[in-house]
Amino acid sequence: MIHRFCRRSVVALLAALAFFAPSGRLAAQMRSAPIRIYADLSEAPQRIFHVHLVFPVSPEPFTLLYPKWIPGEHGPNGPIADVVGLRFMAGGKVLPWRRDDVDMFAFHLVIPDGDSELDVSLDYLTPLESEGYSEGPSATAKMAILEWNLLVLYPEGAKTDDLTYIATLRLPAGWKYGTALELAQETDDGSAEFKPVSLTTLVDSPVLTGEYFRSIPLATDVQPPHRLDLAGDSRDAIEIPKDEVEEYSNLVREAQALFQAHHYDHYDFLLSLTDHMDPNGLEHHQSSDNRAPERMLLDPVARTYYADLLSHEFFHSWNGKYRRPLGLSTPDFQQPMKGDLLWVYEGLTQYYGEVLSARSGIETNADYREWLAWTAAYLDNWPGRTWRPLEDTAVSAQLLYMVPGQAWRSWRRWVDFYDESWLMWLDADVTIRQLTHGQKSLDDFCRLFHGAPSSPPQLVPYTFDEVVTALNQVAPYDWQKFFHDRLDQITLHPPMGGITGGGWRVVYTDQPNSYIQAMEQSENLVAENFTLGIAVSSLDGAKGGDLLDVIPGGPAAEVGLAPVMKLLTVNGRAWSPDVLRDAIVAAKGTAEPIVLQVDNVGYAQTVRVHYHGGLRYPHLERDPSAPDLLSNTLQPLVPQK
């Protein structure tokens, strides 16, 4: 501990050595000798992960790094603030250390003469309730998900591909686990020791564990093996119906038929079922970390809302892990990533995540069209389009991911490279089908760009020009202009060519959109985007509904409403979703305003909103004057069993 030494002398010495890179001898030693990591999750129910690492070292200045830029998270959000209890030891003595005063993710120390091993211990305190990926909650009383980047340190100056780690995992008594890591042996204390892997592969191989755990083989007629690993907060949560197992097996078959190749030795869908983690997914090469509400497999509404979760992350094994934009293909976890091609990485995946979900039967074609209608409609009504081009949402992803809540999302724009690129890639698919008279499609691009030959996990970077070249091999066209027109330009409307050219059009009626209904129930909100121009939280309704977003230029914004205000009453009645919608219906075709009382951070305010158009929800309507190419994109490639 540092108070046992002369602090001033230690700090001066370390400051003088802080910028020294590891010597060639040390770098070679790190490449040849494995680093051992012992992860102890026995106190995961208390939200504490313990770790002990052993590094081969030489007597010289030494810097260890905590991962900052996590692949797939597209931002410098390694949760270092939750790392505590850090201690370095060599030769049985505690060593002084200093955090870099510029790079908070770097730790400097000096290895004494005669010492060849450095022991490092630390604890990771998983947050209890918050949003995010690896920086969000990772454990509950009954289960945990271990992303190894939470616990690892690694030597400065080394590529993560060149570092070998041997991981050992200890779990609470009775808990089982699933991971893409391969087991080497069970140790005497019941821990699992895994086969040596590179640091890249370790961080790419999360572990799902829990008291209530199941591992289910999928598509046993397909090789290599695929498993659905489930862990939940209750025994009921993991009781997946047989027909859903078959649908996820269809997902495996459809992906294999699409690409006609794979780039993994085996694949694990890791699915956490809990209401105490932020629902999301994170892609990995031979697995995916999928998090959903506890009853997602049992509740039809939740299942509709999260229908594309596993298909999206599975598609990433090809698009994002095997093929990855050059700017995201960094040699370690500290180098900044460039997100300008996230409209391919995430956008193409968003498109095919939905397509594969429909082709597999996880969602119906009608559900797909309802989600597509919502996506096209909300993007068409966002005023942020008047100042921010689509590509900028990708370039600035690391900023936009960190914006909390929904306030002013319609004016700021969010990570629109997901949903708007879905529309853009649908447009590209329909364009290819039109150019080739139905002989080819975007499926052919996927096979060419992401397909044969099959291989173990590997990374093949690409550039924008390579995407254009591959598309031209499928169907000659000015693809460079096609994308630049949709990416670089300020456009008042999202790309609708895939919908209209696909034989459909967006219409508005007073009938509810089934996807919006599922979204409202799952996210606890009321989305009146297309009437008053507001989204309202339906939580804690007795105290009023928080205005999550107010669309600039809409009826509510015109009378001075804004996010953070709280909706109290509607036409004199205490606010509720039904009361709000009844008022919208009652005002249709009249001259009477909708009277809202709101709380503006402690100040009462009454406003009169003049909106008289009634309820409006988007849907897709068939246009019989054009061929139904949209439905063709959803046709299964494999006959359904």
Image (cartoon, grey):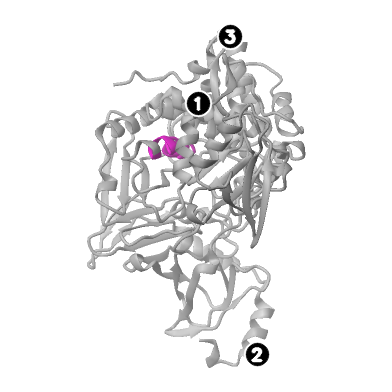
Q: Are marks 1 and 3 in contact (CB under 8 Å)?
A: no
Q: Nearer the viewer, residue 248 or 499?
A: 499
Q: Which residue is mark 2?
A: 8
- The magenta region covers 302-316
Q: Could you tell me if residue 565 is visible in this image?
A: no
Name the amino acid, label 3: Ala
Name the amino acid, label 2: Arg
Spatial CA distance of label 1 from label 3 is 25 Å
| Residue pictured at 28% horizontal, 46% vertical | 238
Which mark sits nearer the N-terminus, 3 or 2? 2
Query: Callout 1: few (<14), some (14-19), or many (20+) C-alpha neighbours within 10 Å?
Result: few
Spatial CA distance of label 3 from label 2 is 78 Å
Q: Could you tell me if residue 81 is visible in this image?
A: yes
| Residue pictured at 27% horizontal, 51% vertical | 213
Which mark sits nearer the N-terminus, 1 or 3? 1
Residue 311 found in image quarter:
top left
- For residue 511, the mark is 1
Q: Is residue 341 left or right of residue 322?
A: right
x and y percentages locating residue 103 in the rendered image: 65, 67
| Residue pictured at 51% horizontal, 59% vertical | 135
Per the image, label 3 sits on a secondary structure element best described as loop
x and y percentages locating residue 156 in the rendered image: 58, 65
